[in-house]
Image (cartoon, grey):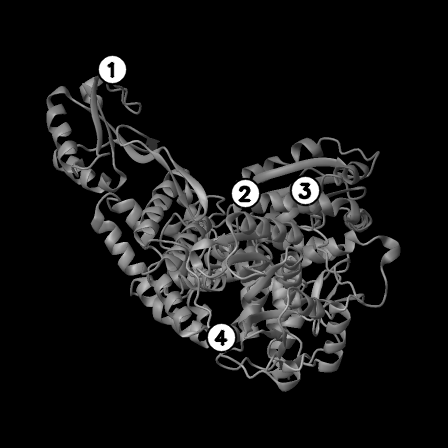
Amino acid sequence: MSAADRSRRTTAADEVCAQAYADVGGPELGAALVAVGGYGRGELAPYSDWDVVLVHDEGVDLGEAAARLWYPMWDAGANLDHAVRSLPEMAAAASDIRVALGLLDVRHLAGDPNLTLRLRTTMLTHWRQQAAHQLPALRTMTMARHELLGELAHASVPDLKEAAGGLRDATVLKALVATWLVDVPHVELERCRQSLLDVRDIVQELAGRAADRITPEMWPELAERLEVPDALAAQRLVRERGRRITHLSRLAWRRVDGYLDRPRAARPRRPDLTPLAPGVALAYGEVVLDRTAKPAQDPLLLLRAAAEAAEHDVVLAPPTAARLVRQGASLPEPWPEEARRLFVRLLASGRGLLHVWETLEETGALAGILPEWERIRLLPHASTIHRFTVDRHAVETCIEASHHIRDVARPDVLLVTALLHDIGKGSLTEHSVAGAPIARAIARRMGFDAPAVETIGTLVRWHLLLAETATTRDPDDPATLDVLVERVGDAETLALLTALTEADARAASPKAWSVWRSRLILGLAARAGRALDAGPTMPAHAHEPVEIPEQVRRGGMSLQVEPLADGARVTVIAPDRVGLLADMAATFAVQRVGVRAARAWSQEEYAVNVWEVAEAYLDATVLRERFEAISEGRLDPSGRLRPTGPGRLAPAVAVRPEASTQATVLEVRTDDRPGVVYLVAAALAALGITVRSAHVDTLGPQAVDVFYLQEASAGALGDERAAQAAHAVRAALSGESN
Amino acid sequence: MKLVTAVIKPHKWEDIRVALEAVGVTGMTVSEVSGYGRQKGHTEVYRGAEYDIALVPKIRIEIVVPDGDVDAVVAAIEKSARTERIGDGKIWVSPLETVVRVRTGDRDDAAI
């Protein structure tokens, strides 16, 4: 099957049409027989329709020709789709977008060639003029089709023509290019399209009819005809082409949207860059590098650009990603903490992850970050319950898992495990057994500490345990729980496994997380939770005593800045007082310095704060001045640090009475944004509550802060005061005036 | 002809299928259902949220059998579904008037 065969079929059909036109004495002037659609493009598959139109100028007498013309074509066995229209009627019909698309490929068969030329020119001009009106409708139609038929790259029974990334999309892409609003790499598009046309020819021959869907039993035969080693290779070939067209199509549509969304007057000639993060900016709906970017010196640039693009749900510009692959510094091993943070932010970004991940794959950037991905790339699933190929399923699982970051102590572990849970697929060993050591090695390379590496390994190894046990074992049998508890080990891992199980099932198919199944699984998880005596576990927070400097003992303060690999550590020591933590947090927030982690504790009558911040170049003098201005009341930070709107997720504030006997423990989870620590600390200070120690962390896109609170007169808070504190903090984070 | 209906614990389904095949049952209808009997459901708190398990997940099996096979089929289900714990389920047998095989138009015993 090849372009030559299609061309041969087309030529044969053309001859029949031309002969028929001659036989009925079709007019030489003012009328023409034209081919449109796939036939117009000269791409007849074995069972394709012949789409032909007898077009004529107004007033031309076609006589008997219009009625008799079609018989020889029917006699030749063609599936004929025919029409007779005048030129103005053609123009009117083109207001239907499907007709307009078909007419972009008009080809002359017989009659007056000048009329065909005029028709073609009219149609193209009309298409360009009407683009701004017709493209939104075309977009809606295209998206509805994708919704219905899924993606060629990932659907278990892919449709070569109508699925996303299929032949219809390739045609639509050509039509988008014809508007002159966007461009795509033509050679690449054509290569993928021709390759899919070859596949469709074979599929139709195998099916013996005008079929476009590749059923599972066709793959081995298809492999033989495509001269690739096996069915798996055939799947990869077809799906890869589909993936490529989907990618080009998504980019083209994003660009069309960007063009249509901009008011005509506001289409400037100079690029309009909105800075997003160091070295990274947004231009026309795409994340690009700005002039300050130094790819060769900044190994985090790619991850930063990717995380920003995904969180803003915009395109990571493929040339940017490709440039970072060529010129970017490679990540050191193990990854620095900031790289891991950015990667987790990317994974936690929700639906925005999908397109950015695709760009990372298509540009080869992923191979540098996660070479193991190749194992599962475009790998079909053996089980029919899965909607997607293994790689896409892993990405979908991350998207589902991003809804659970409030439910688990370690969202970073959850998201990385969601990405890697099926990494062992594609070998002969059972995939969770094969996957655990691979996942552990990746987690180590990403710089996770030993306990987190172990948890990731355990979760990958047992990611099917909860679902399998719930559906195949007696939940009332104590032995069932014993096995589960022994394998999972602790309540924190169980919570992670429960969230992972739900995300995995939801990503596989709605059927895999039906109400019935979820009841079985969550019921078992609840029993196991009780068996593990699941109180929320709090990490033990110990502090190394520091030496109190002389100037602090004399009543002053000490503020030291120590540069780190990707930020700085700021240590503040001062006489302890209510509100000190709030003032220091405000100092960073008004300076727009991102806080990654903080530890605060009391030592003798002094307060010690150790802050890890994202900014490498901090001036201790400026910080001290700001701090003094805030603590003396000369600078009021409350106005500018008030939350401007609701976050992506509502803040979660919980009192953990069981975590400590000497203090009340308040756990706060909220979107990571500037001023979070300040808002919490200020709300507590306003109630006269002392923060005995604080542990601030950023896990992916959320801040997870734990505060050990005491009354100013010492001692844990009573129930009522604890509730009051939680309420005040929640109100402060939600932006409600309290 | 009788309709044998059983509501069983989900994890027992595989054992029951094997036992039924052994007594010659070649077809059945299986559905995922929820309900409660003496086992009762209850409400639990898990991951901070109240989680309603008032309805317990079960599997419902329906088999049409000739009168002579009823005892063997019921015994096969009973034996393989039993864990001797609460919630093992129920089996009930109801009379049937007519059975039709749609494809051939066969009636009653010939249609089973």
> Residue, x 68% and y 42% (percent of image)?
A98
Q: Which residue is the site of mark 2?
A: A148
- Above-or-below relation of A530 to A422: above
* Amino acid on which the number 4 mark rests in the picture: His
Q: Which residue is the site of mark 1?
A: B98
Disc 3 on helix, strand or loop?
helix
**Which mark sits nearer the N-terminus, 3 or 2?**
3
* Amino acid on which the number 1 mark rests in the picture: Thr
Q: Nearer the viewer, residue A538 or B102?
A: A538
Q: Which residue is the site of mark 4?
A: A543
**For the view shown, which residue lies furthest in the right direction?**
A265
Figure quadrant of residue A250:
bottom right
Query: Left or right: where does residue B47 sit relative to residue A114?
Result: left
Disc 2 on helix, strand or loop?
helix
Q: Nearer the viewer, mark 1 or mark 3?
A: 1
Separation of marks 3 and 2 at Cα, in angstroms:
18 Å
> Residue, x 39% and y 54% (percent of image)?
A535
Q: Residue A213: x and y, percent?
A: 47, 47
Separation of marks 1 and 3 at Cα, in angstroms:
52 Å
> Residue, x 84% and y 68% (percent of image)?
A270
Q: Which residue is the site of mark 3?
A: A98
Classed neighbour count for the residue bearing mark 4: other residues with Cα under 10 Å, few (<14), some (14–19), many (≥20): few
Disc 1 on helix, strand or loop?
loop
* Amino acid on which the number 3 mark rests in the picture: Arg
Disc 4 is attached to a residue of which chain?
A
**Which mark sits nearer the N-terminus, 4 or 2?**
2
